[in-house]
Amino acid sequence: MGPIARLSKTRRNGRRQGESVRIRTECSQAYARSALLYDAPDQIVLEGLGVVARAIQIEKVEKFKKSQSRADSLHAKYNIATGAKCVSDEGWGHLQIDATSLYILTLAQMTASGLQIVFTLDEVSFVQNLVFYIESAYRTPDYGIWERGDKTNNGLPELNASSVGMAKAALEAIDEMDLFGCRGGAESVIHVLTDEKQHCDTILHSLLPRESTSKEVDSSLLSVISFPAFACSDPELVNKTREKIERELKGKYGCKRFLRDGYQTAREDPNRLYYEPAELKIFENVECEWPVFFTYFILDGLFTGRDEQVEEYRHLLNSILDYDDSGSVLIPELYFVPADKVDLECESPHSQKRYPGGKFPHMWAQSLYFLGCLLYDRLIDPPELDPLNRHHFIAKNIDLVIQIALVAEDESIKEELSVHGIDSQTVDELRPIHVHPARYLSKAYTRLGKNAKLGLSGRPFLDIGYLGTSKLYSHRKTIFAFHPQFMDHEQFYLSWDVDMLVDFIQSNLAYLKRSWNLNGRPTMTLEVTRYLLGEQGHKTSMLKLLQKLNSGYSMGARVKIGKLKDFLKTSCITKLSFMRGYPVIEESAAVGRSFHRTLSSESTASWEREGAGSFSGGPALLSPVTSKKKSISGPPGSSFDDIQVQL
């Protein structure tokens, strides 16, 4: 007896409530596994098998983080019995970011529900590297959910909204997730950089309601705007995408995947892998219709409370269902127009009878159909399928206040700013908070996901975006702040152009106003030097900007200038828990206008060469575990500029 029948029987017989709850949990878990983990035809990702299958290709994960090359992508197909690959690297469009993203999303949802899927720190490291694998989805063309890439089926990948949206949902779901659940700790937590999530969100919203450059619309977007991803936070854009799919792709037997889709049609040549450049025209109006998308519309209506939509698509779906000898429901993969009726269908769309084709039954459609039945009959509730409550829209903070802390180069700069009524602090006044360039945060994150046993190097050394540097970070009871990337004079020479730097700061403010949706307020830490202010008595564009910011309003956002220590209670603070094994080293004095410190040990100097040393007189974020005090060559008081090997 299946879980649905058992649950129904339990309720009819009026057994004790505890037994009903237990069976309900069993039922929801069973069908959550079956439905959440199907992402494309012929592809199943099982909870344990997914880790095993991908672990076989660890080298590909490591290479893809740096190359984003199709040749280094994870395989999209695996042997379900052994977990081994079953298609060669060149024999399939393996680069499907949506597949890996769906696995991560499902892992997060199942972990949030109370299940433990991951049990070792090696698996945690691997999942963390899978996050690095998908975090560049917003700029990585792939073959998409249909494994064909460009609509013309020429073997070329393209940027797909369905892949970007699924990646965005996965990154949001897995961020700060403890994979060991209540049994975990700092080492089993997954971390995602805020800017990577925002990049995916921006690209997704710019693509919708389109799927890609070649596809005007695609039914696969239903899985992005609704269950299971719920990736779009704009209700108007969600409605616009849904309406476009209904208007252009909906049929009597299901929805077309996309316009001029030749897959499994009578006019497609099964002996050729790719199409001719002008061949798409012959598939117009005879595209196959897929019942699985009716199940998506049903689930969408059940999650959003659109009862009319639910009844409409249940009626459409029930009219095309098939049954086996035992009375069980069977849903085919698709419905096609037979060859002798193609011309008539082209002349009058939706006039000819279609016949079931493809896989029968279609497990993807079957599982979603069962989920819809469970929700419709109220045997399970939406939160049981979506423990992270992604189906609830999160409104952005419309009354955001951006906090700005100014770090003066010396006392003279501080006094000059105070003359204009602008509050600032010197390096010595910052303690116990320490300020570093953004590149040191990039270096710290290279430790994330590093695993020597598996041969994983951690996150590549990449720039940290505006959102990342607008947070404060805590490590071993020490608070760290970071200057924006564009203020790093050693790596970004355009920052010496004061007018351009002013534009960057204004753009940063506008970006934070538009994109910030984290708990707490964003905090910008800006370095103010004599070069930026110019000679006394002359108003530079930077001084004018600071006066504008001091007025409390700029670039459409509320702004507050103050001391960094006063912002601690209202700022967004992230724990660098993955840095537990790297203690903070001793403080050293700030040197000169560049805020670089004097080096006092050989080991400290070597670590600084790796780009992880201290800035503005604070302790380093990274350091060797052990060090021996030794004097170094060079004149006393040699600055960081004198002996550092730059990154």
Image (cartoon, rainbow, N blue to C red):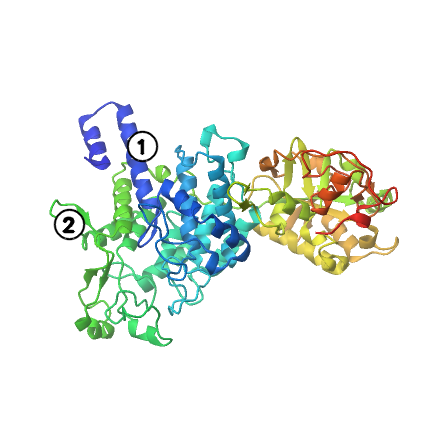
- Label 2: few (<14), some (14–19) or many (≥20) C-alpha neighbours in 10 Å: few
* Relative side of 319 to 48, left or right: left
- Label 1: few (<14), some (14–19) or many (≥20) C-alpha neighbours in 10 Å: some
**SS at mark 1 in the image:** helix
Q: Residue at x 28, y 49 (%)?
A: 310
Quarter occupied by residue 385: top left
Q: Position of residue 268 (x, y in %)?
A: 27, 70
Residue picked out by circle 1: 25
- Residue 647 got which mark? none
Q: Is residue 111 above or below residue 538?
A: above
Q: Which is nearer the eye, 565 or 623? A: 623
Q: Residue at x 78, y 40 (%)?
A: 425
Q: Position of residue 447 (x, y in %)?
A: 60, 42
Q: Do labels 1 and 2 touch, CB within 8 Å?
A: no
Q: Which image quarter is the N terminus in? A: top left
Q: Which is nearer the eye, 319 or 387? A: 387
Q: Is residue 551 visible to the viewer in this orientation of the structure? A: no
* Relative side of 471 to 619, left or right: left
Q: Which residue type does callout 2 highlight?
A: Tyr
Q: Which residue type does callout 1 highlight?
A: Thr
For marks 1 and 2, give the CA distance: 28 Å
* Relative side of 76 to 13, left or right: right
Pick out the residue farthest to the bottom: 278
Q: Is residue 645 visible to the viewer in this orientation of the structure? A: yes
Q: Which is nearer the eye, 639 or 361? A: 639
**SS at mark 2 in the image:** strand
Which of marks 2 and 1 precedes in the sequence?
A: 1
* Relative side of 410 to 322, left or right: right
Q: Position of residue 58 (x, y in %)?
A: 47, 48
Residue picked out by circle 2: 323
Q: Position of residue 216 (x, y in %)?
A: 40, 66
Pick out the residue farthest to the top: 16
